[in-house]
Amino acid sequence: EEKNKQIEELTKKLEDQGIPVQANTKGIVLSGYVDASYTYNFINAPAFNRVPGFVPPPGYVGPTNTAGFAQGYPAIPGREPVDAIPGGGFNMNAFKLALEKPLTEENRWQAGFRADLIVGQDAVVGAPDAITGLGVPFSSWYSFNTSSFWLEQAYVIFRAPIGNGLDIKIGKFVDPAGYEVVERPVNLDFTYGLLFANLLPTTLTGMQAIYRWDDQWTSRLGIADGGFNVSRGGMEYFGYLNNMINNNDAYLLFLNSQWEAKGKNATLSGTLMYGFNGVNPPGFGASPINGVAQPYGIAQGIRGEGPFNQNNAFFLGDVWGSWAPKFARDRLLLGFELTGGFYNNNVTVVPGAISGLPVDLSSGPSNWYGAALHMKYQITDIISIAQRADWMESGWNSILAGHNAPTDIWAYTATLAFDLADNFMIRLEYRMDWGKGVLGYYGFPFQNPTGSPTALLGTSNGPVYFVGLEFVYSF
C-alpha cells in the first residue's frame, strides 16, 4: 500500500511538470532469440605479412610488399560478410529483441506498432544503416563486432475499416520480397543464400497499404525512399543522405501479392519494385573502358552507396513459393525462388577527376538474375535435414559487391538440425561456393571503411568451402 502511494505521488509530480504518464499498454508481445556459432571458412586469413602479391595496376596506391607487389587480401564477396570471415572462430551472431502491439482480427479503427532490434555480428545485414561497436576499421567496420547493433524494424500500423480492413504501415519495415529472412533461425539453413545476400533489400523506409481480399489472397502497395536498407537514398552529402540522385528525387514503388492454400500447406508470393529515378544503394559498378580490365570500378552492392549511379529506371522482380505435400505428412517442405532485374544506366565515361580514381571508367546498364531451390525433410521429431542450391548471374556494371566483370556463381548448402528441447536448436552446416570470381583478392580488405571502390587485384573460381555449428534459443 505504501509503495502504491509513492507511485501515485511520483506520477502526480510528473504530470504537474507537463510529463504525461500512461498506464501499461495491454497486449504488447515480447519475443526474440539468441544465436551463437562456430564457423570455419577454408581460406587462409593473411598473417605475419604473408599476403599474396600481385603486379600493381596503373595508379595503384594500396599496400605493397618489400618486392613492390600489391598485397591482395582474400574475401568471398558473394557471401554475406559474416558468413565469409577467413579461417575459423566463434561468433555471437545475434541477440534479437522484438516488441509488438499487433492488431486484432476485428475490422475497426485500431492501431499498433512493432520494433525489432538486432545486436551482434548479424547487424551487418542492415548495412549501411547498422552502427558498429568499438574496434579498428579493418576488423570491425562492417559490423564484425559483437557490440554492433541495428534497428531492423520500427513502424506504426493502423487499420481503417474499409472493405475487409485496410492496414497501413508507416516507418521502417522488412521488404516483402525473398524466400529467406534476416532471422537465421527462421530460415532452413544457417548461412544466408546468394539471393538474399546479393540481390534483395532487407528493409525499406516508407509507407505501405495491406489488403486481405479473402482467406487466400493478400496484396500490398507501397512507396519507400530510394535506397535499400536506409532511410534516405543517394550518395552522402556533407554526412547525410537527401534521398536524391543527381539532384532528382529518388523513390521506390513496390507491389506484392501473396496466395496461401486453403490447407495452409502452400504459399506463392510475387513482388515488383520500380525506381523511376534510380536507387542508391545498391551501388553499381563501372565496366572497363575498351574492354580492358580495370581493378577499380567494382560495385558496392546492395549494402553500400555507389558513385556511378544515375537517374535511370531500376526494376526488380522476385517470385518465391513453398509447398508441404500432404502425402508426406508434414515431414517434407519444398521451396523455390526466382529473382532478376535491370538498371537502365546511361553509357557514359566517368572521369577520374569525378570518381577520385586514377583511371577513367565507363558507366552503363546492368542486369542480373538468380534462382534457388530449397528442401527440408523431418527425419524424426528431433532431427531434420535441409538442402539449398542457388545460382546468380550479373552483367557488366555489376550489382554484385566486389566484382567488376560478368559473374556466374553457384552454391550448395546442406544443414542438419537437432531440436533437442523446447525453443532450443543446434544446426551443423556444410557449404560450397564456386563460379567466376567467387574468391577475390583486394588491395585493401574487402569491406573498405572509406566506402570507395576497392582495388580488385586477382580472382579465383573456387570452390570455397564452409562448415559451421550453430546454437539457438528462441523466446
Image (tube, grey):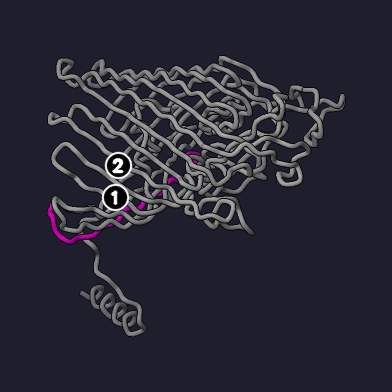
Q: Which element carries disc 2, helix, strand or loop?
A: loop
Q: Are marks 1 and 2 in contact (CB under 8 Å)?
A: yes
Q: Quadrant of residue 429?
A: top left
Callout 1 environment at 10 Å: few (<14), some (14 to 19), or many (20+)? Answer: few
Q: Position of residue 53 (x, y in %)?
A: 77, 22
Residue denoted by label 1: 30
- Residue lying at 23% horizontally and 60% vertically, measured from the top left: 111
Mark 1 and mark 2 lie on one chain; the one further toward the N terminus is 1
Q: CA distance from mark 1 to mark 2?
A: 8 Å
Magenta-drawn stretch contains 141:
no
Please state, as top left, top right, bottom left or bottom right, where the C terminus lies in the image: top left
Picture layout, residue 456 above or below residue 276 = above
Amino acid beneath label 2: Phe
Q: Quadrant of residue 269?
A: top left
Residue denoted by label 2: 475
Q: Position of residue 389 (x, y in %)?
A: 41, 18
Q: Quadrant of residue 382?
A: top left
